Amino acid sequence: VQLQASGGGLAQIGGSLRLSCSVSDETSSRYAMGWFRQAPGTEREFVAAIRWSGGRTYYRPSIQDRFTISRDDAKNTVYLQMNSLKFEDAAVYYCAAAAPRSDYSGYYYVPAAYDYWGQGTQVTVSS
């Protein structure tokens, strides 16, 4: 399974970006999908996730009212709509896919719960 993240770039404070993650597997609907981010000198941190069928979503508390994760299984693509961007949102954003697991709801925020990773897309926020 290969993941391709795109949509990063430069945005102003308060602006918006939409990240996309395309999944090579035509059965992408079976994977839970997550977005993580990593700023220089920091550990990779959870941003948002969406389960397979049913689409339950999870968010990092600090972004819950600003970011929205969604999926279009017909296009094998997951999106992260980011609004009201802040300086602290600047990072490399990674998408990841997790094969079905019964305990996913307890580990969705843990990088090790994901089996496949994309290459990352840079998000820069300026004043």
Image (cartoon, rainbow, N blue to C red):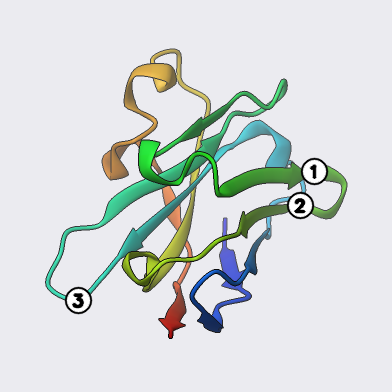
| Kind of residue at disc 1 | Asp
Circle nearer the N terminus (3, 2): 3
Q: Please name the residue shown 87% across and 46% down the image.
A: 74
Looking at the image, residue 111 lies above or below residue 79: above
According to the picture, the residue beneath numbered tag 1 turns out to be 73
- The residues tagged by marks 1 and 2 sit, at their Cα atoms, a distance apart of 5 Å
**Mark 1–mark 3 distance (CA, rounded to whole Å):** 32 Å
What crowding class fits label 3: few (fewer than 14 Cα within 10 Å), some (14-19), or many (20 or more)?
few
Percent position of residue 44, x then y? 25, 57
Amino acid type indicated by mark 3: Pro
Q: Where is residue 49 in the image (x, y as percent from the top left)?
A: 51, 38
The circle drawn on residue 86 is none
Q: Does 127 sit above or below residue 54?
A: below
Q: Are the residues at dot 1 and dot 2 in contact (C-beta closer than 8 Å)?
A: yes
Dot 3 corresponds to which residue? 40
Say which quarter of the image contains residue 81. bottom right
Assign a secondary structure to mark 1. Answer: helix
The residue nearer to you, when weighing 86 against 95, is: 86
Estimate the spatial distance between the alpha carbons at disc 3 and disc 2, rounded to whole Å: 30 Å
Q: Which residue is drawn at 54% across and 41% down?
A: 65
Circle nearer the viewer, 3 or 2: 3
The residue drawn where x is 72% and y is 20% is 54
Mark 3, secondary structure of its residue: loop
Q: Mark 2 — residue?
A: 76
Is disc 1 surrounded by few (<14), some (14 to 19) or many (20+) residues within 10 Å? some
Q: How many marks?
A: 3
